[in-house]
Image (spheres, helix red, strand yellow):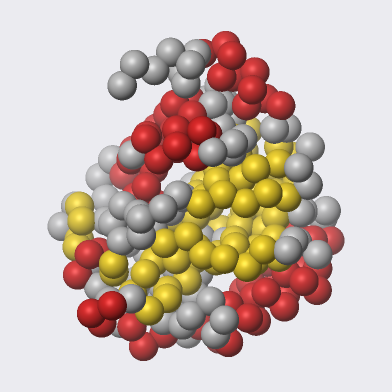
Amino acid sequence: MARIALCQVNSGDDPEANLKLIRTGVEAAAADGARIVVFPEAAMARFGRPLAPVAEELDGPWATAVAAVAAEHDVVVVAGMFTPADGGRVHNTLLVTGGGHHRGYDKIHLYDAFGFAESDTVAPGASPATFELDGVVYGVATCYDVRFPELFRALADDGADVVLLPASWGAGEGKREQWEVLVRARALDSGCWVLACGQADPAATGITVNPKAPTGIGYSLVADGFGRVHAAAGAGPETLLVDVDPAVSAKARTATGALANRRL
């Protein structure tokens, strides 16, 4: 079993203040036995503010501070940040740090949808990413990536039994329903556990944000390779602590044939 914490928080505009959220979340999760602590997309700084001024390399002070927190508590931390890209844009990067790892995954699929154009300020990544901890392979994906089953199947082909999915989901009519369906569908498509950690809904705590930015709806969710929901959060700040059995992924793939029976 792998114990994983999903810290559904409201990130603010200030990266230093958001580091405090990460320290507090990691400390509590590690005390409860978590080996991996996941924070949402844009944990460094929420959407709706200029991103280029806060973007840093993976060896910069923000990521280095997160790495120190992970090392102090002997966990892997996965958290959304922004790193510099060419042409004045940034990469929407997931930092994976701790347990001998310190690397980033740059979001491949950009949120040019529902009237928002992430590609105006963010450059796309190109390569899926996995990491190993305690003999288990984990894949990572970010928010809008969940609409693309081929990425999750590619992660399964690369050995992942669990996919960690930080998000800052955009609000709107039907968006919660889409989020829940997509997380469960990607688990079924790939036979992986999908652990989706979203930004909490700012409205749930009375926080005023840019109404045009995807600043989160909450409802973090954990589904296994059979599409069964094992844990779900509400709209506000909350931590989900889940014990994941990677062996369920092999059982799901055998039962559904979703990978073995592919023809395209």
Picture quadrant where residue 19 is located = bottom right
Lateral position of residue 1 relative to residue 18, left or right:
right
Residue at left 37%, top 47%?
Answer: 145
Task: Indicate the quadrant where residue 27 lies.
Answer: bottom right
Task: Reply above or below: 116 against 17.
Answer: above
Q: Position of residue 223 (x, y in %)?
A: 56, 33
100 left or right of 142 in image: right
Relative to 18, say whether 94 is above or below.
Answer: above
Position of the N terminus, as image quadrant, is top right
Q: Nearer the viewer, residue 237 or 132?
A: 132
Residue 160 showing in the rendered view = yes
Of 238 and 66, which appears nearest the observer? Answer: 66
Where is residue 61 shown, x and y percent of the image? 58, 87
Q: Is residue 221 visible in the rendered structure shown here?
A: no
Residue 13, x across and y down, in percent: 43, 81
State the residue at coordinates (20%, 52%).
113
The image shows residue 179, relative to residue 235, as above or below, that is above
Task: Give the position of the C terminus as an image quadrant.
Answer: top left
Q: Residue at x 59, y 30 (%)?
A: 224
The x and y percentages for residue 57 are: 48, 80
Looking at the image, which residue is at 25% across and 82% down? Answer: 88
Front in this rendered view, residue 195 or 103: 103
Horizontally, residue 98 falls left or right of residue 62, namely: right
